[in-house]
Amino acid sequence: MMEWIRSGSWVATSNFAEGIPYVAVMTLSLIMYKNMGLSNTEVTLYTSWLYLPWVIKPLWSPFVDVLKTKRFWILLMELVIGATLAGVAFTLPTSFWLQGTLCFFWLMAFSSATHDIAVDGFYMLGLDQQKQSVFVGVRSFFYRVSMILGQGALVMLVGKWLEETGKVAYSWSLVFYLMSALFICLFIFHALILPKPDEDGKNEKSSAKDIWRELIDTVVTFFKKPQVIAGICFMLFYRMPEGLLVKISTLFLIDNPSCGGLGLTEVQLGLVQGTVGVVGLVAGGIIGGILAGIYGLKRCLWPMACSITLPDLVYVYLAYALPANLAVVNVCVFIEQFGYGFGFTAYMLYLIYYSQGEHKTSHYALCTAFMALSMMLPGMVAGALQEVVGYRLFFIIVMLCCLITFLVASFVRIDADFGRKKKE
């Protein structure tokens, strides 16, 4: 029993540690830079570039496998992430806050991506097959808990301190110092509790030449797969509406009504997006997974394609109605996030489907690179587009981009039984 508790504790906390820096880089930075006075164009451009480490992650993931142990990389990256969080907090009150924070966010993003590689690999080495199966739900649950903490509780905490002090840099510094302290605690905890499996580090003798040869072979075979053009287009453009929407929706919710926004406070934003929205996202994903297991990906593709696009209409409504009732805003965000969670199931299943065959693990890593790129590229232009056309027309353009989602979904070919639970 104690061995199960010990295993469960490091599985839970290591996956919690995966989520916090990702939320800091992708969500908290967005809100923070908006609070600090940057334009929507600047905010979305700077923060979208931070996706790059996840885009190129497959290039250095083989080296993480052979250079030192995965346990070593987990502990080192948690220490570095803690330091970069403190670095953001330290530079915020300075005159070079923009350059300083961007530098530390870049380091945090690379460290977080490396930490992801190590944690995912260590999960396979540190647990037997029975525990791997049992703790799958624990991994997912605690990653979602980190999202609620980061996007919900911490944003609400910033809002509370802003209301009390009126000092933007000071309030955000306190939150990042708090996250830094949390990561130092996680580092100490994991240094004491992470096991030392014999298999960890056994690939250290592979040469750099062998790694590069295998990496090139992986890339070549990836692009020789059947339907490669349709597959890559699906990976890049299925989420096109969400790629445009994801950053602007947050900025719209907190922007001044005089600029066409809803004018929510940070406390309200933490509730709406970081709590209600995350619950909707998780619920949609769970239901999507259940239905895909019953009917298979092929039958679920079109309902899920509609689900990931059509609920974006709620932002067209919000931009025109500008409701003052927070309950209405909560319902709209819940609907959109539920639809995204449900529709995203088809995307993740397709990545698994495309990765089948030889080198499936490496091919899946390349698929996730295209997944990150699908959010990075639209996000880079979203702010500039919004500032040219305004929030209302921007959300209408998002809806027109749904046609791209339907187009790429029509090109892919999927086996009828893929994803469906087989009858015994």
Image (tube, rainbow, N blue to C red):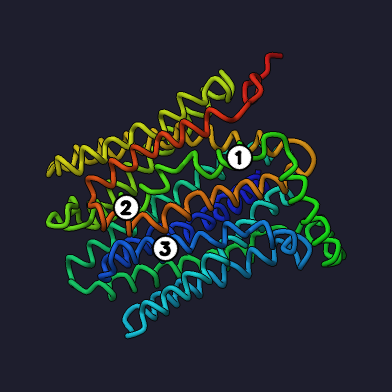
Q: Name the residue under label 1.
A: 136
Q: Is residue 374 above or below residue 380?
A: above
As shown in the figure, which amino acid type bears the numbered disc 3? Thr
Please rate how many residues cluster around mark 1, counting C-alpha atoms within 10 Å: few if below 14, some from 14 to 19, many from 20: few
- Report helix, strand or loop for mark 3: helix
The picture quadrant where one finds residue 222 is top right
**In whole angstroms, how far apart are the C-alphas of marks 2 and 1?**
33 Å
Farthest residue, direction top = 424
Which label is found at residue 47?
Answer: 3
How many numbered marks are there? Answer: 3
**Crowding at label 3, few (<14), some or many (≥20) Cα neighbours within 10 Å?**
many
Q: Are marks 2 and 3 in contact (CB under 8 Å)?
A: no
Check disc 1 and give the amino acid type.
Val
Q: Residue at x 59, y 34 (%)?
A: 349
In the rendering, which numbered label is found on residue 248?
2
* Measured Cα–Cα span from mark 3 to mark 1: 30 Å
